[in-house]
Amino acid sequence: MANKEIIELTSKHVANTYGRFPIAIVKGEGCYVWDGDGKRYLDFTSGLAVCNLGHCHPAVVAAIKAQAEKLIHISNLYHIETQSELASILTGHSFADKVFLCNSGAEANEAAIKLARKYFSMKGDGRFQVISMEKSFHGRTFGALAATGQKKFQLGFEPLLEKFTYVPFDDIAALKAAISPKTAAIMVEPIQGEGGVNVPSREYLKEVKKVCEEFGALLIFDEVQVGMGRTGTLFAYENFDVKPDIMTLAKGLAGGVAIGAMLATDEVAAAFTPGAHASTFGGNPLSTAAGIAAVNTVLNEGVLENCRSVGGYLVKKLNGLKTEFKFIREIRGMGLIIGMELDEGVKGGDIVKDCLAKGLLINCVGDKTLRFIPALIVKEKEVDEMIGILKASLDWYKESKSS
Ligand SMILES: *Cc1c(COP(=O)(O)O)cnc(C)c1O
């Protein structure tokens, strides 16, 4: 179908929950996608940090094809071969001992919140409070929404799940003032994604861990966006030399297939006993087969090295633009999650729209930060192409404001 036809059908029949750009993407390969009219775009959004291996990576496609012909779904009433294998790979490369599989980031966070409550309930220590961060994003279901420290996502859905408290990110004094013996968990993204690509100072997460230990609270890292190689290590926490008790994953975990995972240490995971939590589709053969292929590719095909080196190159190039355009305030990030913060009043959304017209997909988070999250297999020459288009858009924006 052509763009126009798809857009007409969408506006007629699809719930209006997204402010969508006026194109439909119908095909993808590596770092490029094509719309319904056959126009090609360079993709620096990667399905929002989902397609970490690029679109339709051959290893993921092959795994999906093979699994689809063998077994697509079977209930968790039975053991599932690919689920056990994916869980063993994830625990083998992380702090965790056990994995609960589900289908999205929000679901993974629901599982994390439920596990934290169950853990203290089984200890006979009725703790409910969860402290999360201002500008955080944890998903749209009621538990995850309550954890999300941004009013704009919560408006109209109150009353929310109780006992959530928010403190400013990267502010250890504020956390110390908020925590108490009633705190069950502190939930934090090691780097905030939707909140504007906010990287904490070096020691912050270590300090958070110390505070947790002092009060006997659990530490939950939401790595739904920054996990799976995005920061140049398999998990973002590895960069900060601190281990959580619980971690959630989703977006990049299965090369584009819907999946979520909640990982925990044996001690904490023991609170989930048969019947405590479940998901019909969680850990199904198809998504976990894709997950195995995706994780093995990230680990064995030089993807992390590429992420670090091309990430460094991208930052260098973006800093070059910063010296040229005075309305660029800061370039920040890690690996291949990079933000370009613009001055107050600069319309990031207009620049995103102009880039789209010029054949580049990027997006804007936290109102004024352009976010660059290309596939982790992106090459320097694709970064050069992106910088060329972005520079043309910034030139256009500068001129449109001066005239
Ligand atoms: C995207 C995201 C979520 C929500 O994931 P869904 O799959 O959309 O439910 C949760 N946490 C973080 C950090 C995210 O970036």
Image (cartoon, rainbow, N blue to C red):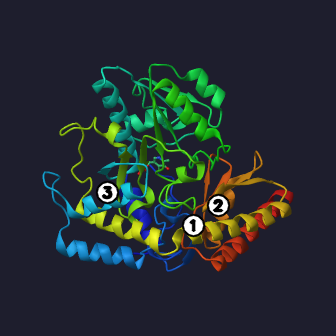
Question: Which label sits in the foreground, 2 or 1?
Answer: 1
Around disc 3, counting alpha carbons within 10 Å, would you say few (fewer than 14), some (14 to 19), or many (20 or more)? many
Read off the residue under disc 3: 87
> In the rendered image of this protein, does residue 233 appear above or below residue 189?
below
Q: Say which label, 2 or 3, has the lower sequence index.
A: 3
Read off the residue under disc 2: 352
Relative image position of residue 73 (x, y in whole percent): 19, 62
Q: Residue at x 23, y 44 (%)?
A: 278
Q: Residue at x 54, y 78 (%)?
A: 39
Viewport quadrant of the C terminus: bottom right
Which numbered disc covers residue 249? Answer: none
The answer to which of 398 and 153 lies nearer the viewer is 153
Relative image position of residue 92 (x, y in whole percent): 38, 58
Q: Is residue 75 left or right of residue 230?
A: left
Res. 309 image quadrant: bottom right
Amino acid carrying mark 3 in the image: Ala
SS at badge 3: helix
Q: Residue at x 50, y 30 (%)?
A: 213
SS at badge 1: loop
Q: CA distance from mark 2 to mark 3?
A: 38 Å
> In the rendered image of this protein, does residue 177 appear above or below residue 72?
above
Relative image position of residue 48 (x, y in whole percent): 50, 59
Q: Say which label, 3 or 1, has the lower sequence index.
A: 3
Amino acid carrying mark 2 in the image: Val
The answer to which of 111 and 268 lies nearer the viewer is 268
Q: CA distance from mark 2 to mark 1?
A: 15 Å
> In the rendered image of this protein, does residue 110 appear above or below residue 332?
above
Amino acid carrying mark 1 in the image: Pro
Read off the residue under disc 1: 374
Q: Say which label, 2 or 1, has the lower sequence index.
A: 2
